[in-house]
Amino acid sequence: MKKTPYHHGDLEQALLEVGLSEARASGARNLGVTYLAKQVNVTPMAVYRHFPNGESLKVSISQLAREELAKRMQVAVAREADVKRRFQATGRAYIEFGLDEPGLFAVAFLDCDATPRRYDDPSAWDIFQGAILDLAEAGYIELVDVQAVTSMAWAVVHGFVVLAGSNTTYLSDTTSAQIDDLIERTWRGITAPL
Amino acid sequence: MKKTPYHHGDLEQALLEVGLSEARASGARNLGVTYLAKQVNVTPMAVYRHFPNGESLKVSISQLAREELAKRMQVAVAREADVKRRFQATGRAYIEFGLDEPGLFAVAFLDCDATPRRYDDPSAWDIFQGAILDLAEAGYIELVDVQAVTSMAWAVVHGFVVLAGSNTTYLSDTTSAQIDDLIERTWRGITAPL
DNA sequence: TGTACATCAGTGAACGCGCGTTCACTGATGTAC
DNA sequence: TGTACATCAGTGAACGCGCGTTCACTGATGTAC
């Protein structure tokens, strides 16, 4: 704990880690410079050695949350060989991430206006799109429909997380069967003939 | 302007109005007690004559935004006689509201945790559900599926607004045809045979 | 190998800000007799 | 109809808070000669 009284080993890394765990615990509430600095036992000013301002720190944490989501989707997708099941797995992973980690989910899609797109790793969107391109390749859908299908699939899962996450009276408790049902209907929506 | 130097005619109403227009203009950014009081040329303290605290004022404004959405959907639904077209109209109205009024949309679905459900008028959800109940009555879907279909439909339109609203690189500009496409796919998803 | 010095990474105190909220008050309103 | 008084709806100054950010600084680190 008191290993580095003056020079912190890697303050940037430490800030991001504590920020991510704070996001996991309580969303975007406590991602301020002052608060996070206190968590790492460091003066607020020290943060500015590594980030130009508080906003950029928040953006970085948001980016980490998105990478976490993408990682989960990629794991899920890697487990399936069939293209259809791979598509379903991406959607399911997305929803489960949103329900398991509401804090990270909120932070991941927080103020997207300031969020630049400089991913090296594939984003959640890329993974969706990849799975859907595979569907097109396998002949389930038309190639021209890939973009429309991707945005629909994303809209479904994202919207569902918002719905299930808010404790509305509409959806009491989300069951695994409900998720299956949702994904199945989405599947029909994108593959059903006119 | 200087009509009522001391006793404001109806401060509560005035606060809600300015709050709603502020929400329309810039989302949830400026819905604080101090700021809104200033807009109505009133001391912050005066607000507490009408609302127990700042949060409850915000909740009331959020409620107004939701009513605005419901109103739009109801207008749209009233224009259509056919049950299928009515279903489509609700979805379209929802999406168009989200795109036309991003500020109101954000405020409407802001911190749903604190939002009690005490609607007199039907909510957006109720209108969705109503349209879908009509579908069931007309035989398009099974009655047992009403809840699942409603949550799917809501998820689609809500998620789509979020997607189109964030200026991602994925969706450049939303066209009317894109919305039609989305709704048509949703329709297929909920009515297609297994 | 040892010292001199630039550079790096932190300290600690302070700022201005706007927030929500509390206090004691006072001007306007409306009702009872 | 007029007056007395309770009540209502606002004022205005002040509070404590945490925020992001700036300042001048200093202790630690590493490199050049």
Image (cartoon, coloured by chain):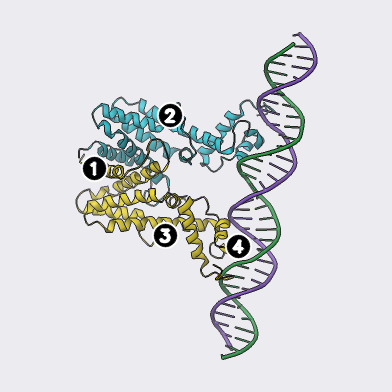
Chain colours: A cyan, B yellow, C purple, D green
Marks 2 and 3, Cα distance to the nearest angstrom? 40 Å
Amino acid type, residue under disc 3 in the picture: Arg
Q: Amino acid at mark 1?
A: Arg
Q: Quadrant of the C terminus of chain A?
A: top left
Question: What residue did someone put label 3 on?
Answer: B118
Residue A21 appears in the picture as rendered? yes
Evaluate whether label 2 is on the same chain as label 3.
no
Amino acid type of the residue that numbered disc 2 sits on in the rendered structure: Lys
Q: Chain of mark 4?
A: B
**The residue under label 4 is which amino acid type?**
Thr
Q: Secondary structure at mark 3?
A: loop
Q: Secondary structure at mark 4?
A: loop
Q: Earlier in the sequence, mark 3 or mark 4?
A: 4
Alpha-carbon span between mark 1 and mark 4? 55 Å
Q: Residues within 10 Å of mark 3 (few under 14, many from 20)?
A: few
Q: CA distance from mark 2 to mark 4?
A: 51 Å
Query: How much space separates mark 3 and mark 4, taking CA atoms?
Result: 29 Å
Residue at image mark 1: B188
Circle number at residue A71: 2
**Are the residues at dot 3 and dot 4 in contact (C-beta closer than 8 Å)?**
no
The N terminus of chain A: image quadrant: top right
Q: Is residue A29 left or right of residue B175?
A: right
Task: Using the numbered discs, state the Cα–Cα distance from disc 1 to disc 2 in whole angstroms.
Answer: 31 Å
